[in-house]
Structures are given as C-alpha cells and as structure tokens.
Amino acid sequence: MKKNVLIIGAGGVAQVVAHKAAQNNDILGDIHIASRSIAKCEKIVAEVLEKGSLKVPGVLKAHALDALDIEATKALIRETGVEIVINVGSAFVNMSVLRAVIDTGVAYIDTAIHEDPAKICETPPWYGNYEWHHGDECAAKGITAIHGAGFDPGVVNAYAALAVQDYFDQVDSIDIIDVNAGSHGRYFATNFDPEINFREFTGQVYSWQNGEWQTNQMFEISRIDDLPVVGEQTTYLSGHDEIHSLSRNLPVKDIRFWMGFGAHYINVFTVLKNLGLLSEQPVMTAEGLEVVPLKVVKAVLPDPSSLAPDYTGKTCIGDLVKGTRDGAAREIFIYQICDHKESYDEVGSQAISYTAGVPPVAAAILIARGDWDVRRQVNVEELPPHPFLDLLNRIGLPSRIRDGEGDRALEFTQAEDGRWSVAGA
Amino acid sequence: MKKNVLIIGAGGVAQVVAHKAAQNNDILGDIHIASRSIAKCEKIVAEVLEKGSLKVPGVLKAHALDALDIEATKALIRETGVEIVINVGSAFVNMSVLRAVIDTGVAYIDTAIHEDPAKICETPPWYGNYEWHHGDECAAKGITAIHGAGFDPGVVNAYAALAVQDYFDQVDSIDIIDVNAGSHGRYFATNFDPEINFREFTGQVYSWQNGEWQTNQMFEISRIDDLPVVGEQTTYLSGHDEIHSLSRNLPVKDIRFWMGFGAHYINVFTVLKNLGLLSEQPVMTAEGLEVVPLKVVKAVLPDPSSLAPDYTGKTCIGDLVKGTRDGAAREIFIYQICDHKESYDEVGSQAISYTAGVPPVAAAILIARGDWDVRRQVNVEELPPHPFLDLLNRIGLPSRIRDGEGDRALEFTQAEDGRWSVAGA
C-alpha cells in the first residue's frame, strides 16, 4: 500500500489531476504539486480549496521544482514522503523524473511519451527510444512505472486489452478514434501549447498495419464514422504514442490512430505550414532580427488555457475493434463522451484536459490500493483493465460500448473471489 | 524642351523604367539612377548595358541617394543637370522628392500616391492629404508635376479621360478592372513588397458611388467578367489611388476599382489576417522577443523580385465605361494585355512591373517633347490622353478596345493641324 502523491506540472492537465486527487485524498493521502512556477501551483491549490475538492482534511501543498534537476526532484520526493509521482509536466522532463523515482524507490505514472526538444517524430517504436531502456532496472528494483496512463494513450490501451481479453477470440484491427466535437468560439486556437501541438502533425505518420510499421503524411488518409452523440465525423490517420506499445503488447496486426480535424483547422494548419510559419528554424527579417516563426505564431494565437471558460460541446474517444468470436465476425466500439462545460464547472478545465487528467489519478488510486502496484515498468494494456475502467466509471469518465446489440454503459462486476467480468462480453 | 532624367528607386519598376528610358535616350538624354543601395543601381545599369538597351551612346550612371534627404536630392539634381525626375522609389519618399524638384525647378513624375508609414488608408481623397497641398506652388513656379503616371493609376486615368472626351456624351460609370492571370508557380507570394502589398487590403475600401465616397470591407463585394484573352475572372471592389483624382476631375458619378484575386490568395490572406500575422503592431514571444508579425511573414515569403524568371501568363487591365452617346446607351472596355514572359525577356521584370514602369517613361518623353510639359501639378486624366496612349502603343503597351462592334486595336491619328482622333470613337 503506497500513499502520498507528488504531481509534477501546473498546466491544464495538472489542474485536473490536483482536483481529482483531492477528491480522493482519503485513499491517496498528502498531495503535493510542483512546477518551475510555484505561483501556478499555488493558484491550483487555491482553486482546489475554493471548490472544496478535498474529500477529507489533509495536506495540499505547492512547491517550486525544475523537474530536469534530478537531485532536486529526489530531494523533494524524500522531503515530502510521497510514494507515488504523477508526472504531467512537459514531455521533455519524463526521463529525469523517472530517474529520480527509480533512485528513491517510489512509483511513477506519466501520460505522454518522452520527447527530445531537438527531435521530431523519432523512429518507432517511440517507447523504445527512451522509456523501455529502464525496464530491466525497474524490474530489478521493484519500481512500479506506468507509462501513458492518460486517456489516449491510457484508457484507450485498457479498452484494447479488454477487447482482446473479454470480447474476441481474435482481434484483427484496433482503430482508436479521437474526436473533439467541441467549440472554443475563436477563429483558431490549439488546445495545447502550439509548439507541442503542431509537432504532432509536422512529421511522418506511423501506423501499425499488417504487423509492420507504415508511414504516411499527415492528412493523407481519412475516414468518416457516424459516432455516438457527436455524429458523423471525419478523422485522419495520425501518429500517436499508444500504437508504439500496443503493437508490441497485443497480438493484433492492424493498430491505427485517427484524430478528428475540421476543414477549417486543416486549412489554417496547411497555410501556416506551407508558408514556413510552423518552422522551428530561425529566419532573418529585413531589419536583421533573427526569429523562429513558430514562436511568433504561438505569440499571436490565444493562450490555450484561456479557452476553457467558453468551451462548449463534447469529446468522443474510443476504440473500434474488429475480429472474430466463436467463429463469427464481431465489431465493437468502446468509448467515452466528455462534456467541455461540465468539466470546466467541476475542475476549471475543458474536456481535453479532463480526459487526460482523471486517468492518472485512477492509476494512482489503483497503485495505492495495490491492484496496479506491479513493481515493474508497464504500459497500460499490460495491466488488468477492469478495475481501472470500473474506477473511471465512478470518478468522472464513464465508458460505454456500442455493438450489434446496441449502445450501453460498460459495466463491471467483481466476484467474491476477486475475478472481474464485464456485462455483455 | 526638357531633357536628362533622374530615376529614383532600384526595384522591379525602376528596372523597367531604366530599360525603357535607355531605349529612348535619343529623346531623353542622360539617364541617372539613384537609390539608397548604389549596388542595386549598378546592377540595373549593368543589365541595361548587357541587353544593349541604350538607343544611342550616352550617359547611364548609378548614384547612392537617400531620397528622404531633400538637400542631397537637390544636390544630385543640380550636379547631374537632370530636368526630369521619375520617382519610382518607395511610396514614403514622394513628398521629399517633390520638395527637391520644386526647389530646383525641374519636372516630376511619380506612379503611386504618397504614404505615411504610420498610417493605413487615410481619409479620401488621398491626393488631398499630401500631393494637392503643392498645387498652388507648382502653378506659381511653373513646375510640371505629374502624379500617378504608372498603369493604374496612370494609363487607366487616360482611358477614362479618352472615354469622356471621345466616346460618350455622358459617362455614368467607370469600372477599372485589374487582373493578373499569370502564375509564379510558388505556393504563395506577393508581387510587390509584402508590407506594401498587404497595406492595400487591410484598411477600408473607398469607392466613388452616386457622387460620394462609399466604404466597404476588402473582399466584401465581387464581380465576374468575361475579359479579353484572360477569360472569366472574379474581381473584388478595392481601394486604389486613381479613384481619388478621377472623382474630382471627371463628371462621373460612379468610379470603382476592381482587383482580381484567386480563391487561394484570398484564403491565405484571410488566414494570416485573422490570426493577426499581418499586424504591424509588435507582439512578445514567450521568450521575451518583441517582433512585428508582418515582418516575419515578409521574411518567410519569396522575395518578389525572385518570381520574374518563372512568371507565365498575362495581365489584363482596363476601364469598363458605361454611359450614353447620341441618346443611346453605350458600353466600352478599353484595355491592355501584357505577357509576363515577354516582359521578362525584354527588360528582366514581370508584367506587373512592366506595366507600371513603361508609362512614366512615356510621360517623360511627352514632357521632353513638350506635349505634357504643362508647368503645373496634374493627375494623368487632366492631360491629353491621345499622345500618351499613342506613344504607349509604340513602346510596348498597346491598348485595345472592345465594344458592340467587336474587339480591335485602339489606334490614334494626328492631323496636320495637330488635332488627335481615335479610330471608331
């Protein structure tokens, strides 16, 4: 049984993590939040207190920390006595935080793959470039390190594992579909830091097809689906973290990720990219000033955190899984619908941050309870999906399933012997 | 009889002016070219010599000059002994060059309205803000100052005057239509300095309708015409210099300017404008660097002068004039077609520079010959159009007319008594 949590980061996702951890502090214990800007942490602490999110009286404290500083991170872990670190800071700090966690013997959770700021779209599998180098050491030292425990990657990996385990004899394809059908009411904005956001679309698109890596260009391949609640949506084959672990851990020959974009978003992106305004390479103005165009684009776009109060509509993220069961073809869609305004009313963040921030808290609760304290390095699909999805049903992210028999809540039950089952599998 | 010419400026239009002046140096005499960068002037001189453009052996010389420096400009005028100044430099230097011209008693020609760099789209009539303040002084001192003697403004003003004088009893409307149906083969580029180019479209659109100024937004109002050679074209109501003098000098209640834009150009422009990337107001990057977005856009776009070698296709610029003659409704289109590649082969510039650069040389020749040495300040429509258009027919910009009787060359004849007539009027 581990307890006491350190949250690293103070952005939109960290804010959700803080609120949700506070709502479950009877299990999680003390809550600490650290980022380079202690002011941002203090603001989150104040908001959590203001909303009365702490379930029971307890510690909720802000700290200043440069998470690239391994020794400082280790010192903070020891000083606070935390046993679980939820890293939702910049994708550039994962490896230094993981080092600090291993050296101090506590548990680790992150939600996005490590990135080197100088590299875009490294060779697949991405986890093999950084995270998986630490697998043997984690196993030897009994370190629980869960990578990619947000929504996507994270919940969608659990959906994939559940499908393989409970719904199919053989899975042929998993298409992960991520649609934000919400509206922020601005001419154009990115939902995360534009520098990070555009990085996802400027490189090669890797997908796993016929049991090998395939490359495409962004916006080259699209599909149209009639999705629950959000209706007909066009999505585009995109590169994404989860493909890089699912392709190793599940016996499925086609694993693809599809992200929804409106025609307007694609148009603006295409204009900026073709003009060279998304470039990270500096240009020289006629006046002799050296400028990185992407940083100027970032400066003129709305601050992503300013969008939440006006965000309306819903997200829909799920796994469309095809295969066979008892010799017959089967197709299911396991998914989650999240409402921007309800998210904002509850925790002050829109649905994109909400869906990313609630799952790592569920993972922390499962580590605290012991279910997921596996003392080795894992991706989410290597862990039992049932307690995770059951817990998410109860703490804000209820899942549903649509198949030949209709559309219904994805309900789990645990027998007295501890074994889980899911209704309608 | 005036002679010896000083060309101010060393851009694409100045290059055309230098070539055409050289081709007519038997009439114009010595040719001097001056800009802040003497290297640019020397490059033009070298190209004129290389093409053998000098009609007769004579002076062709480059000078360094900051045309905002009135005393330096006066000194250069006196030192070179020029009697005609063709100002095709930046629109920001007109007033200082005019001052130097008046003080030295020589003749002045420009092709675009004066602009204050700090102001966009001042109140109409634009000539009333700067140029016309000098009318009395020019008349008193006998200074010939011809404003707006490019193609548009310039040749289109002569078309308007010709229509009023020779083709109609009453003109009801003049619609000036400017279409570049050429292609530079790049994703996106502006044909002039992006900073100047975009200034034309970011402010109010002024037009003269029902005898008063009307304001619209750019791209708010469009028309489609089936034009000679270039075919069906969509153009947009735009603000332009010539409306601001024609509305004073001709008895016509509707005078509008229409510029052609492709859907792609408008899309890119709209995206950049809506994102704030065409702003001249500095923004601050996350790293604390103060940057003017428009200057970064300029830095990533192709250098306009780099487009000429690959430019193909044609421009079509003309006046669609409607009114009555002998009690019957009449409609004519007087126009000019210019080919990008032919222009480049002749003078090393594309058709947009060519059409702007040949007319001021024609104006200089008419001053040298005496036809247009009127010893006062004028816009082109106040001068006899026949010798101007006749000369342009002979030196590279032949005009045509399309009316109910067909499409034909616009041919002029001068009787022994000196009176001009135009065929088919």
Image (tube, coloured by chain):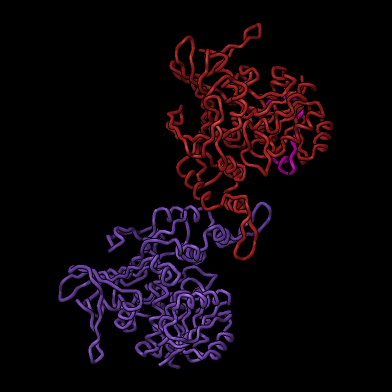
Chain colours: A red, B purple
Q: Residue furthest left?
A: B327
- For the N terminus of chain A, give its image quadrant: top right
Q: Nearer the viewer, residue A299 or A245?
A: A245
Residue B253 as seen in the image, left or right of residue B311: left
Q: Residue at image x 56%, y 34%?
A: A206
Q: Residue at image x 68%, y 55%?
A: B288
Residue B112: which quarter of the image? bottom left
Is residue B58 a member of the stretch shown in magenta? no
Q: Residue at image x 61%, y 37%?
A: A348
Residue A100 as seen in the image, left or right of residue A215: right
Q: Residue furthest top?
A: A417
Name the spot of residue B259 as percent of width and height, x first: 37, 63
Query: Where does the magenta region start and end?
Result: A22-43
**Does residue A236 lie above or below A404 as drawn?**
below
**Does residue A271 lie above or below A404 as drawn?**
below
Residue A82: which quarter of the image? top right
Name the spot of residue B192 as percent of width and height, x first: 48, 66
Is residue A40 a member of the stretch shown in magenta? yes
Residue A371 as seen in the image, left or right of residue A268: right
Q: Nearer the viewer, residue A321 or B249?
A: A321
Q: Residue at image x 35%, y 60%?
A: B235
Q: Nearer the viewer, residue B386 or B331?
A: B386
Q: Is residue A362 visible?
A: yes
Q: Total label count?
A: 0
